[in-house]
Image (cartoon, rainbow, N blue to C red):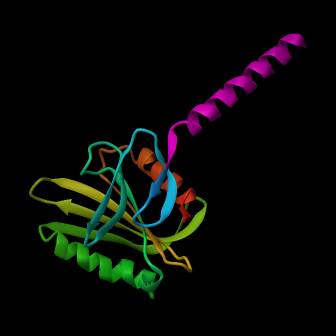
Amino acid sequence: MKKTMSILLILALVCGCAIALADSEWTDYHCEKDGFSTKIPLNALTDYRDEKGMVGMITYLKVPGFPPFVMAHRRPAEGKFKNPQGYLNNTYREFLEKKYPNDSVGINPAKTREIGGKELIGALYTLYNKEYDLTTYQLQLIEIRDGGDVEYIAMYSPEDDEETVMKTLDTIVANYRED
């Protein structure tokens, strides 16, 4: 009986240490420009990008400036989406086709997805560059909010650890807090 209790106590301590280690993998981050806070991976490099089609706080998971990364952007209330599904299925797809004229752009149409414990509308785009035989995935998500919608992007290649990218996306979405 004492042996069983000792083993159970040791298992409880190990589980507690594992949970503490998992929490220590993340750090709080405040995006001054968009007015929100979230959690990001402890050793990730963040930057703010402001170019057409890519605006917001970007969290690089490997090499700065390249996928894999996760982006979050809070749109002002006056920039709310009138038709998020139409935007994802048509407007944004057409934007990608113009931005990457040498790539073929495929789309898994917009649908509701559960990410970070929230219901988001999202579409998955596949960008294929024939010249370099390079495939990139871009998951574009929209969280509808009264004070201004939030856009999230996860961009990665088949060679990247998709599980790490999705865990980062899930954590950023789950911990998103407006100022």
Q: How many marks?
A: 0
Give the quadrant of residue 102: bottom left
Instruction: Indicate whether residue 9 is drawn in magenta.
Output: yes
Residue 110 on image: x %, y %: 43, 75
Secondary structure that dominates the magenta span: helix
Q: Residue furthest right?
A: 1
Placement of the N terminus among the 4 image quadrants: top right
Q: Residue furthest top?
A: 3
Q: Residue furthest bottom?
A: 82
Residue 46 on image: x %, y %: 36, 50
Near-viewer residue (77 or 17):
77
Instruction: Indicate whether residue 19 is drawn in magenta.
Output: yes
- Residue in the picture at 54% in, 78% down: 147
Report the magenta residues as a range.
Answer: 1-28
Relative to 174, say whether 112 is above or below: below
Give the quadrant of residue 17: top right
Residue 149 on image: x %, y %: 48, 76
- Residue in the picture at 72% in, 24% down: 13
- Residue in the picture at 27% in, 57% down: 136
